[in-house]
Image (cartoon, rainbow, N blue to C red):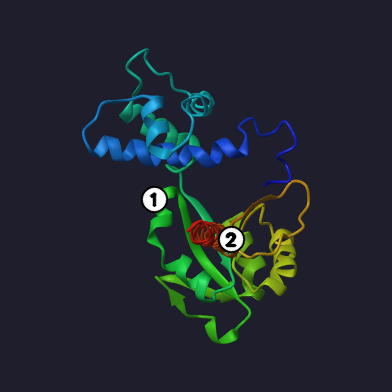
Amino acid sequence: MSNLESTNLFKVPEPTLRRLPWYLAYAQLVLKEGESFLSSTQIAKNIAVDASMVAKDLSYVQISGRTRVGYDVKELVDVLENFLGFTNSHNAFLFGVGSLGGALMHDNGLNQFGLEIVAGFDVKYELSGTSINRIPIHHTDRFVELQKQTGVNIGILTVPVDKAQAVSEIMIAGGIQAIWNFTPYRIRVPEKIVVQNTSIYAHLAVMFNRLNAIKECENCQKKTNNNSK
């Protein structure tokens, strides 16, 4: 969550912003299928959220549905894409060209959502002057110089966990205002810096925990059935 989230600067709650791309993805699917209108009830049923929540979330964007008909699908897609910033191009620098960083540089799908990685930075001198997916890789020492030339203010953090805080401080000092943090470390940043934490390891922990809980429940049920025989 951004450090600014507790202020009045952001009018849309973060949970809403996280759900809006779900609605967009479903609306795009429905549009491809040739449907013209889509109700909040339909959206809710297909992505497993309450219809009242869908209606409330969509109230933050500039679109109104028609009674008993719903939302115009094409308009809904256009409005959501514009509202979420997916139709604009946002350049970003990536810090830490390891396996995860390299994979993100290979991911052309990010462009569809308005994010273009224009350069990668790493402390390994042997990577300097190379490229991935036609994206140049530079030594970290060149970051400040290239930031001044380009004005890029978004940084993607994919360095080892023990380097996360130090590198984030270098990024901020060099002009980065928003950090997409893929490390499991919760970096500490100044109040006006936007941070989004996306740790795949944290999601793995939740998945494994839930899976183990299901297995334990199944084992308990088996024991109960055996004892009752």
Q: Which residue is mark 1?
A: 112
Q: Nearer the viewer, residue 201 or 97?
A: 201
Marks 2 and 1, how far apart at CA: 33 Å
Image spot of residue 87 (x, y percent): 42, 42
From what the image shows, is residue 10 above or below residue 158?
above
Q: Position of residue 204 (x, y in %)?
A: 55, 63
Within-10-Å neighbours for mark 1: few <14, some 14–19, many 20+ = few
Element under disc 2: helix
Q: Which element type, helix, strand or loop, lies under badge 1?
A: helix
Residue 185 shown left or right of residue 108 in the figure: right
Q: Nearer the viewer, residue 187 or 108?
A: 187
Query: Can residue 81 be seen here?
Result: no
Q: Label 2 is placed on what type of residue?
A: Asn
With respect to residue 170, does 54 lie above or below? Answer: above
Tag 2 residue: 209
Rendered image quadrant of residue 147: bottom right
Residue lying furthest left: 34
Residue at 70% over, 61% down: 174
